[in-house]
Amino acid sequence: MPPCLKNKTLWYICSLLLMGTLLIPRTSLSREEDSGGINTASSATESYIHKSINQIRKEYHLPPLKTVPALQQFARDHSRYMAKSGYLGHNESGGIDFRSRIEKARLKGWRVVGENVGRSQGYRNNADTIISGWMESKPHRENILTAGFTMTGIGTAEAKDGTLYATQVFMGSDDQYHDSTR
């Protein structure tokens, strides 16, 4: 008999430790669930969208978009908001529009800025469905194919019902290597 089974208190502690160890692996490295039940920060999906958009830009002889961490977080925050509220758009509650969100986040150093948002549910690849929708929409397509945009941030969130929400923020500055977070 193992030493911890000789004493009931130790047996209970060992049992709890074993159960806790078995429960830990249920978390995912690519998603984290916030308190509202929204899966956020799916880095694999964000990376897939980034690579797909850069491939499209390459086909049009445009330079790739560089990911900027501050823009990534900005996009993730908005996707999380949309997933929680079930709202698809550029504004947030209280009439906070895209430009106001940019100012509030203190993102500086940009000359041009744009944003694409999308959602999809029930498709084999929801990210591809969102990208296709963006390419079929004139304003979203223009954001993707604007040569003046050199930086991006992509954020995704999945609502409780499985709907994928995506936000892509685009920025350009006079100096394409300028750090937009200054």
Image (cartoon, rainbow, N blue to C red):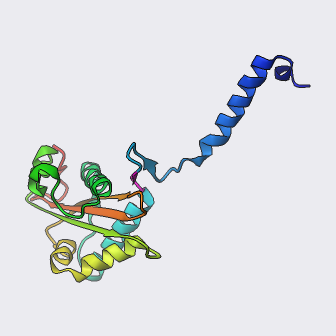
Can you give x and y, in whole percent of width and height, for residue 122 in the image? Answer: 43, 73
Q: Is residue 181 above or below residue 167?
A: above
Q: Residue at x 22, y 73 (%)?
A: 144
Q: Residue at x 69, y 36 (%)?
A: 19
| Number of numbered discs | 0
Q: Write the start and end of the magenta stretch as one range.
A: 38-42
Viewer-side residue, 112 vs 75: 75
Viewer-side residue, 13 vs 170: 13
Can you give x and y, in whole percent of width and height, for residue 66 in the image? Answer: 27, 60
Can you give x and y, in whole percent of width and height, for residue 143 in the image? Answer: 18, 71
- Residue 109 visible here: no
Left or right: where does residue 95 sit relative to residue 117?
Answer: left
Q: Is residue 28 above or below residue 138?
A: above
Q: Quadrant of the N terminus?
A: top right
Left or right: where does residue 79 sit relative to residue 23?
Answer: left
Viewer-side residue, 178 vs 12: 12
The quadrant holding residue 132 is bottom left
Task: Confirm whether the magenta stretch covers residue 147.
Answer: no
Q: Residue at x 20, y 55 (%)?
A: 177
The chief SS type of the magenta part is loop
Q: Is residue 2 above or below residue 140?
A: above
The quadrant holding residue 60 is bottom left
Can you give x and y, in whole percent of width and height, for residue 181 in the image? Answer: 19, 46
The quadrant holding residue 118 is bottom left
Q: Residue furthest right?
A: 1
Q: Quadrant of the C terminus?
A: top left
